[in-house]
Amino acid sequence: MSASARYVAIITDGNGRWAEQRGLPVADGHRAGADTVKARLRDAVELGVEELTVFSFSTENWARPSAEVEGLLRMFGERIDAETPELDAEGVRMRFLGRREGVAEDLVERMRWAEETTAANDRIVLFVAFNYGGRAEIVDAARSFGGGSEEEFRRHLYAPEMHDPDLLIRTSGEQRISNYLLWQCAYSELVFREELWPDFGREAFEQSLRDFELRRRRFGRRGD
């Protein structure tokens, strides 16, 4: 059996469908999803998770309707402004993964401010994948990689200090990893949940962690 998962990544899928099922604007689904991230982050601290990585906005999400994209970016900036002081007080270190080229400078500055404000915290690290794509990360790393080992290549990733996730959770019933942490999740255990992300409560999170603990991780070695 595996030990407890210390490094957890989540594909927070289903905000739009959650809103549609309730006859609400899609922006309400994204707000509900952001609230769920905050709640599960606090649960993660209590459950012994040391790093939590969440998928906020992918490189492919720019293709969504412009009104939805604009609303997401506006909400993202507002959440950084409002929640960084609170997360800082709770000992959360914030890091953002993804391309910053093409992102509005004021939003890039907000992300930089949040990272600098929380840099000394060590209770838990919250990695937020924003304007992120796994293939884009590998391409960007390859551009500056001069050759060598896998560990040397890792130093060129967006956050080389991030541990490979023990566990990758995806909500909403979809069973794919959608260009997320392709390098880092090479040996992650996968758990797929039916709940739409805003409905992913603490009990579902705890069950996902228990599912991981029942797995036998071999990392390519022959099993017993």
Image (cartoon, rainbow, N blue to C red):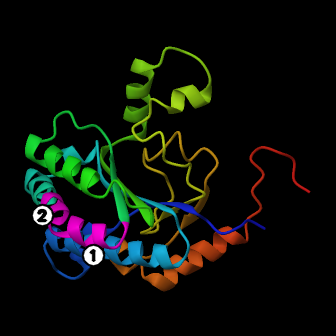
**Residue at image point 47% right, 73% down:** 44
Query: Residue 35, labelled with which disc?
Result: 1
**Residue at image point 77% right, 61% down:** 216
Q: Which residue is mark 2?
A: 78
Which segment did they paint magenta?
A: 75-91
First of labels 2, 1 by sequence position = 1
Give the image location of residue 147, x and y in percent.
55, 15
Residue at the far front in the pictured view: 120
Are circles 2 and 1 on residues that touch, CB within 8 Å?
no
Q: Is residue 125 above or below residue 186?
A: below
Q: Is 27 left or right of 166, judged from the image as shown?
A: left
Give the image location of residue 134, x and y in percent.
42, 40
Give the image location of residue 66, x and y in percent.
9, 50
Q: Residues under labels 2 and 1: Cα distance?
A: 13 Å
Helix or strand or loop: what does disc 1 sit on? helix
Which one is in front in this view, the residue at disc 2 or the one at disc 1? 2
